[in-house]
Amino acid sequence: MDRLEAMTILLGVVDKGSFSAASRDLGVPLATVSRKVSELEAHLGTRLLIRTTRKVALTETGAAYVASARRILSEIDETERIAAGEFHAPRGELILTAPLLFGRLHILPIVTEFLVAYPEIDVRLLLSDRNLHLVEDHVDMAVRIGRLPDSTLIATRVGSMRTVVCVSPTLSAARGMPRSPADLSNVPCVNFEALSSASAWPFRSKGGKALAEVPIRARLSVTTAEAAVWAASEGIGATRVLHYQCADAVREGLLQIILADFEVEPLPVHLLHAGRGVLPSKMRVFLDFATGRMRGRLGSL
């Protein structure tokens, strides 16, 4: 039995959630997937998976084995990359992830420059507002906006991002320009649900650190920043979004930022990668290439 192959198949089943999904992802017949896992369990003399008609789940022993298998396969992969020279010559595929709109506006231009500068590196850019798991989703580097949980990941801070309230000039002319958060009681609002509660928005006291939740009247609640910015530009209400999400509309005069003196602390922006010793050359050169450029772009917002 090829134990490394069996480990790889087992991880495929665990990551994909079923034997059939792993079969499709790995390009291996379903019968082979099932047989390889059964052979591995027989070799170990223990059950690794609990199989049901809908999904599979790890036993306690299986969870420990899978964690060790991931580490072993990762170390083998790293060793092979060193032998192939990837840690010395910048080449290979680099997998990046970033939030959807931020990635399109600010990461894609940097990636296109990077591809010209490093013709032997290919990039797969995964744009998603869902935070992908770097190890489980096989991602080399991620852009994160917001405060980071404690983890073993290595973070390089590249800037910060304001959270702003903006309104169309038409609406502010009709309802009056809000001078303090309390003035929002006279203004209809468009709420971006991923960022704020539909009933209240947080603000800082002017010049202070204390936060206060200010009630709003959300005439419209939406699940994407793009929809919130568009509706606010149409005069439906004031909206609260991250600065980059409304920057184009502000530049074009469709929206104006209000209540800047009461904004909450800006969110940090980081480039993350797994802390696995010496970085492959493709990751090291991208980190060096992108850090200054991202700081410049974020500093100009």
Image (cartoon, rainbow, N blue to C red):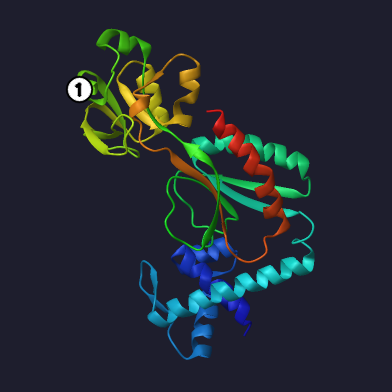
From the top left corner, tell me how far across and down residue 235 is, in percent.
33, 15
Residue at coordinates 23% horizontally, 20% vertically from top-left?
183
In this figure, what is the number of numbered marks? 1
Is residue 151 visible in this depiction of the protein?
A: yes
Q: Is residue 212 left or right of residue 297?
A: left
Of 65 and 38, nearer the camera is: 65
From the top left corner, tell me how far across and down residue 70 is, in percent.
55, 72
Q: From the image, tell me which residue sits under label 1.
A: 185
Residue 280, placed above or below residue 68: above
Residue at coordinates 43% horizontally, 15% vertically from top-left?
254
Is residue 105 visible in this depiction of the protein?
A: no
Residue at coordinates 27% horizontally, 11% vertically from top-left?
176
> Please, what secondary structure does the residue beneath circle 1 have?
helix
Residue 38, placed above or below residue 175: below
Q: Is residue 144 left or right of residue 287?
A: left
Tell me the crowding category of disc 1: few under 14, some 14 to 19, or many 20 or more residues within 10 angstroms, Cα based.
Answer: few
Q: Is residue 136 left or right of residue 226?
A: right
From the top left corner, tell me how far across and down residue 162 is, in percent.
43, 33
The picture quadrant where one finds residue 9 is bottom right
Query: Where, quadrant-wise, is the N terminus in this rendering?
Result: bottom right
From the top left corner, tell me how far across and down residue 231 is, in percent.
35, 22
Say what amino acid the circle numbered 1 marks.
Ser
Q: Is residue 289 left or right of residue 177?
A: right
Residue 162, placed above or below residue 170: below
Residue at coordinates 46% horizontally, 50% vertically from top-left?
131
